Image (tube, rainbow, N blue to C red):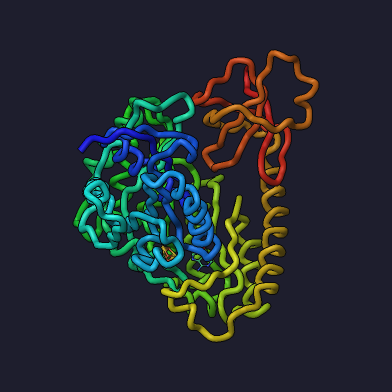
Amino acid sequence: MKYTGNYFVKTIGCQMNVYDSEKLASILSSYGFDRTQYFDDADIIVCNTCSIRHKAEEKAFSFLGQFARTKKEKPNLITVMAGCVAQQEGKKAFGRLPHLNIVLGTQAFSRFGQHLESLKSGENRIVDTDDSPMIYETLPDTECFNENNISRFITIMQGCENFCTYCVVPYVRGAERSRTPEKIVEEISLLAKSGVKEVTLLGQNVNSYGQREGEISFPQLLEKINQIDDLQRIRFATSHPKDLSMDLIYAIRDLEKVCNHLHLPVQSGSNKILKKMNRGYTRELYIERITALKEQCPGIGLSTDIIVGFPSETKEDFEDTVKLLNEVEFDSIFAFSYSDRSSAPAAKFPNQIDESEKKERLNELLKIQETLTEKKNQTLIGKTIRILVEGKSNKLRDGFEDLNGTLKQMTGRSESNKIVHFPSEHANIGDILEIEIKNAYPHSLWGYPVGA
Ligand code: 5AD
Ligand code: SF4
């Protein structure tokens, strides 16, 4: 069926949701809808939701909640809750959002068109939280790409069967499923031809890519993607420490397009907490893997995720996490305060930690990491770093104010995922440049293009 009208897509949550939102957008475009950047102009509003922490879930309800009033003036407005909260809540979502039309679960994208037709034929509320054996395939709509579309996310697998005790993902994203290498390579080749220079491959645990389906391994997939012409850089997330193979470490070392960077969530530095989290490794094993990475891939950029205030985390357990940060010297961390998710087992664990204590630990951790990052960034002063130019920089850095007016302030990213600001007359988005680093800050580096 063909439609007319505008759609607006709001994304809450992780990179996988950014990718899924583009998929939802290309489905709606294929039905004849036009994309709008303003929800006031929209005839259909889709909110792609995240339930990983309580805050994200609340954001989804409050975003969609605001359209209850709009619907009184615009009764034909269609509102859709998609993604993880939709999967988790099912028809319960109508309790808080009586004006909602479609609850579209994480595996229901292929049936979105059907549901829109049902609305047209008079239905008012539709819930689809059914499973799908395969990830829904659509190629991205590259016609709307512009010079800023140099970096894209690509989901290569969905779902997770690790069942970390704090995590809602296995319940809302279902069993692990991988796309075929052919579909992935086809999509990335299309993107590269349309000017995309960098892709980030996404999956909850990329190291188990293709295992269920008996496909090639993740390092073998990287080898295939490495051969795609016009593509400059490959990143991926997330790797699980328990499954990090030497083959993957060698792939990072040997494949020239694979960035020298790894995001390896540790979650905690305490063996007691890691066990309660069901992470399947000890701090010793984690450090062993990091040591191998540093040996094989000198200068590798390392980042991690940490949860503070997991049930029964004592001050000593927290100190173990601080010690781990000091020992590993990550380039950056994403730290979260533990958030109870009712479908995850940890919600029922005893000895929950006070919100104020969690906040204190989180702030302390972030402060410690800021100093560590700045110290690490300062070791790069005087070095030359290769960056991919991502855009104009809106931050006026020390020294920029004295530069002659023809220079633009630009920004790019190093292979190790550091943000680098620099002045240039000629740099274009998508260029690869060598920058000599002159100064370092906690969140960025600053330098001059070599030979400019
Ligand atoms: N509370 C806090 N943080 C969480 N994460 C996952 N579940 C929770 C939770 N219940 C964090 C983990 C994960 C990241 C994506 O989100 O650190 O790696
Ligand atoms: Fe959640 Fe653990 Fe799976 Fe990551 S590995 S998605 S934290 S269950």
From the viewer's side, name the closer residue of 83 and 383.
83
In the picture as drawn, the residue positioned furthest to the bottom comes out as: 350
Query: Is 169 placed left or right of 364 in the picture?
Result: left
Q: Quarter of the image holding residue 367?
A: bottom right
Between 330 and 64, the one nearer to me in the picture: 64
Residue at screen point 48% across, 71% down: 341
Residue 112 at x, y = what percent? 27, 49
Number of numbered markers: 0
x then y, percent, for residue 303: 55, 53
Of residues 383 and 98, the one nearer the viewer is 98
Where is residue 89 shown, x and y percent of the image? 38, 66
Q: Quadrant of the C terminus?
A: top right
> At 48% across and 83% down in the image, what residue appears?
348
- Looking at the rendering, in which quadrant would you find the N terminus? top left
Q: Would you identify the image quadrant in which residue 311 lies?
A: bottom right
Q: Nearer the viewer, residue 389 or 448?
A: 389
Residue 106, visible in the rendered structure: no
- Would residue 308 be seen by someone viewing this image from the given angle? yes
Residue at 70% x, 53% y: name it: 370
Left or right of 404 on screen, residue 326: left
* Residue shown at the point (48%, 75%) measured from the top left: 277
Horizontal relation, residue 342 to residue 397: left or right: left
Identify whether 144 is placed above or below 349.
above
Point out the residue furthest to the right here.
402
Which of the 4 quarters of the picture holds residue 401?
top right
Q: Using the image, determine if residue 317 lies above or below residue 178.
A: below
